[in-house]
Amino acid sequence: MQIWNEEEINIFLENLKDSPYYALFYTALFTGMRRSELLALRWQDIDLILGQIHVNRSLHHLKNGTYIFSQPKSAKSSRTIALTPSTIITLREYQQKQKLERAMFNFPFSDESLIFSDIEGKPFRPNTITRAWTTQANKCGLSPIRFHDARHTHASLMLKQGIHPKVVQERLGHSSIQMTIDTYSHIAPGIQEAAANRFDEMLNRTPENTSSETIR
């Protein structure tokens, strides 16, 4: 498992703004959703006023070139994910752009339209998404991580910020909190250290304060 840090994410996104995949990659990094879940999203699955995504299905391409929609991976995979303010803005802008493009070429647009799709409304192919992700990362000179690692990046950064594992589990749609803890156990030492430091800060017991009290 490889992840990007905050600086690498910002570099990636800043160099991606003109890409047709900008909103997709942004949403992946800021929600931790699976690729199959992202590609199955319709506009009716997103509430841009409340700032929520309702995950209730996934998309899978078949060998014969067709695709099907199916139930999420597990019962816990059906979930509601809170969106960050910046993700809401990104999706609103993408929605307006999509509406204009569809109208220009006389293609339909509705709440049932797939969000991440081509001009005709057909879903992006998974392999196309993966190639675009890798190509863009290489252009930015970033360490090559898989598209699925956007999910790991989201979870790891949330845990490092002190977000409770239960919340991370719910966002990712893991079947149990133990699965989340086991998957991201590699960052546990950093979380422990951050928690210890934050406890000192909460009680205003910084090294400077403690040492001055000792001297007195």
Image (cartoon, rainbow, N blue to C red):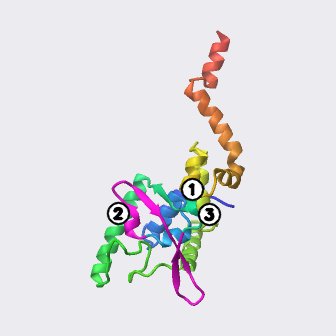
Look at the numbered disc 2 and give the secondary structure of its residue: helix
Q: Looking at the image, can residue 31 be seen? A: yes
Taking the view exactly as shown, the residue that stands out farthest to the bottom is: 64
* Crowd tier of the residue under label 3, counting other residues whose Cα lies within 10 Å: few below 14, some 14–19, many 20 or above: some
Q: Which mark is first along the chain, 3 or 1?
A: 3
Q: Do the residues labelled 3 and 2 touch (CB within 8 Å)?
A: no
Residue shown at the point (44%, 60%) measured from the top left: 53
Q: Name the residue under label 3.
A: 149
Q: Which mark is first along the chain, 2 or 3?
A: 2
Marks 3 and 2, how far apart at CA: 25 Å
Magenta span contains residue 63: yes
Query: What amino acid type is highlighted by mark number 1?
Result: His
* Crowd tier of the residue under label 2, counting other residues whose Cα lies within 10 Å: few below 14, some 14–19, many 20 or above: some
Q: Looking at the image, can residue 8 be seen? A: no
Taking the view exactly as shown, the residue that stands out farthest to the top is: 216
Quarter of the view holding residue 4? bottom right
Q: Mark 1 points at which residue?
A: 154
Look at the numbered disc 3 and give the secondary structure of its residue: helix
Q: Position of residue 133 (x, y in %)?
A: 56, 71
What's drawn in magenta, residue-wise?
A: 42-71
Question: Considering only vertical position in the picture, is 78 above or below 164?
Answer: below
Marks 1 and 3, how far apart at CA: 8 Å
Q: Which mark is first along the chain, 2 or 1?
A: 2
Query: What amino acid type is highlighted by mark number 2?
Result: Arg
Residue shown at the point (68%, 48%) measured from the top left: 187
Where, quadrant-wise, is the C terminus in this rendering? top right
Q: Is residue 13 left or right of residue 95?
A: right
Which mark, residue 92? 2
Q: Position of residue 116 (x, y in %)?
A: 44, 73
Where, quadrant-wise, is the N terminus in this rendering? bottom right
Q: Position of residue 213 (x, y in %)?
A: 63, 14
